[in-house]
Amino acid sequence: MNNPRLQGVIKQILLQAFLLAVTAAVIFPILWMVSIAIDPRNIDKPLDLTLIPPGASFESFRAVLFDNNPLMCSNPGDTSTCMTFGKLLLNSLYVAGGTALFSVILGATAAYAFSRFRFIGRQAGMLAFIALLMLPATATVTPLYVLLGQVKLGDEVLRSTLIGLAIAYTSGALPFAIWNLKGYFDTVPQELEEAALIDGASVTQAFFRIILPLSLPALAVTVLLGFMTGWTEFVLAWLFLDDPTKFTLAMALRSMQGQFTTPWSTFFAMALLMSIPPVLLFFALQRYIVSGLTVGGVKG
Amino acid sequence: MDVPVPLPTPSPTARRKRVTESVRAWLYILPAGLLMLVITMFPQLYQMWMAFTDYRLANLRFNIFNSETWEKFAPPIVWFDNFVKVLTSDLAIENYDFVRLLKFNVTWTMANVFFHVILGVVIALALNNKVLFGRKFYRAVFVLPWAIPGLIIAFTWRNMFDRRFGAINQIISRINTAFGTAFPTDNRWLDATEPPGGGGPGIVLSLVVILPLLIMVLNSLYKARMPFLLKLLPVPIIAWVVAEMFKMIVISPMAFWAVLIANIWLGWPFMTVIATGALQSIPEELYEAARMDGATGWQQLVNITLPLLRPAMLPAIMVGTIWTFNNFNVIFFITQGGPFGRTELLVTQAYKLVFTQRLYGVAAAFSIVVFFVLLIITLLQNRVTRATEAYYE
């Protein structure tokens, strides 16, 4: 046992065994979804633990991607007015992207003030934002509905537009975004800005040229969380949107979970397709996530 | 949150500078602040007003911006009626019991966060090992539970916990064939009302979760700077909470175990990410020095790694607690609060008050009560973790 090489091998085997077990636990539900999605029998569960059921095909994926969605039509009698996957996807991207954009812009400017300025009302402001993290918003949907119904955007009310939805989601994502960004900004050495200020830069320039580029990880996390909120939320969306041409993927998925029957194969095919964009975004931003989630002062 | 630097005695110019700085700071906060003020604060204040009224379906036509609706649709003020009804469970709603909801919600949160942190840290430690092959692969796979939208995961777990041909029962049956065991393969995961295994697993689980937490709480109490007699005061309360949590876990139906498993699956990657970040920031020299002094791997873990992980994990635990406490998707889509409301959380109950019962005034009062519960928990948690923090500084 005193042979260091042998010890290394044993350690490696133990680590791999442990991590492979975790991997199996992580992958299993995903494979279960795949197995149902490619099952042509359209049953709610595979009858056996086999990944590839008899007669497997990608028919359900094709149906989800290219057929009109019969549950979301402007005119239920006319299938050509129904939503397609592409349109739902665009709406989802619009809402999720809007939420991500708003929360990163508004979050970063507010967090910068809390991190860098010592000003009147700073602590009260910070506390107010944290308290908002804890306030359940369930019963606020009623006033929010009325409120967003007051603002006209062109000839539509803000409530029933995708942008109104993105604004509502942003207000939910902001408290954590500000808290997290402030924690990260605190770790950027103040001397860098001071040097820039001495060289004649304005505070705004210092913010854009020094703080923001150095805070990419935390900004990436804010974008990610904002995107996820907009991508998956459907309670407000159901309540606020009236026009089926504005419906999102999350709403489509929820609507397939019918009271009596669920089209299982297409349901899970859609669930898998809907998971792809956030997973891709996670992979793209992965190198930032670890350092970007400081959660309000991990680095002290 | 750090404390602002105390101001030196202000001279007139210094004061003017401070005011201009304040104005500039508030200009930066303005966009976010305005949005929060309009989109969050206004509805929250409105909700507070609703909580004191008997706001129902008919009052939905009431529009604060349109004076014509005021007289006709304004809800009657009932003062604290809603709060009393919420707290004393005096509502004509099936299975509504505020005290049980609260106990279950606290127990659910503690059990989940406990496993998230333990698993998260252990997996981060394994991933951080220098000899490990395939780190990139594991890192990529391990973000999946976090990256896949929560409602999809919840639908999938609901499907897997099904009684007939559900994945979990099928796996148990495979295990039985492979090892000759005889675990039940016909488990009614989501609607059985009795605890699994006659309560035995519940006792084990509650010991695993509660004992370490109890030790932490007692430890922080012991270290707190206050007279000894004062320290004795919270002891009966702690004993009561522990007893209630113990009871809650032991009598919880199988559905509690199902949602616990699903939510553990969902929640650990966040903690792993935080722990990884903290592990990477521990300077390698500390370990080198320890090795030169002849410290074993275990000693290095206990004396260097874990103490330096603490400051990073504490805020993550706070956020994780709030998120888990208000975690809507898992319960709502897997058990719908069933069987008989035994896995209902405060948030799912609030949702039902709004969207099923349409008791808007009651729901508003309920939300405010939930806020105060969460506030107390956060303050207590802050207290416990702060008290132990000083120990390492």
Image: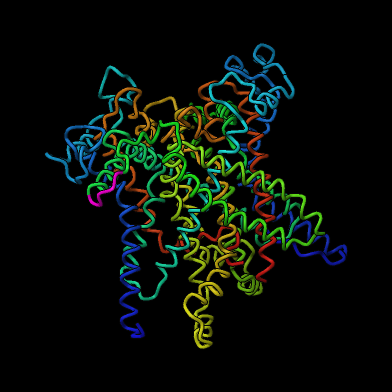
Relative to B259, B43 lies left or right: right
Q: Is residue B67 above or below residue B153?
A: above
Front residue of B23 and A58: A58
Q: Residue at x 35, y 57 (%)?
A: A22
Q: Quadrant of residue B74?
A: top right
Extreme residue in the bottom direction: B292
Relative to B340, A132 lies left or right: right
Q: Quadrant of the N terminus of chain B?
A: bottom right
Return the x and y of residue A152 as percentages of the image width and height: 54, 28
Return the x and y of residue B71 as percentages of the image width and height: 69, 13
Q: Residue at x 32, y 43 (%)?
A: B183
Is residue A98 visible to the viewer in this orientation of the structure? no
Return the x and y of residue A257 as percentages of the image width and height: 34, 29
Q: Is residue B324 above or below residue A88?
A: below
Extreme residue in the top direction: B72
Front residue of A121 and B131: B131
Can residue A9 be found in the magenta stretch? no
Q: How is the image coloured?
A: rainbow
Q: Is residue B130 above or below residue B38?
A: below
Is residue A227 visible to the viewer in this orientation of the structure? yes
Return the x and y of residue A98 as percentages of the image width and height: 46, 44
Q: Main secondary structure of the magenta part?
A: loop
> What range is drawn magenta here?
B178-182
Q: Residue at x 68, y 51 (%)?
A: A126
Relative to B331, A30 lies left or right: left
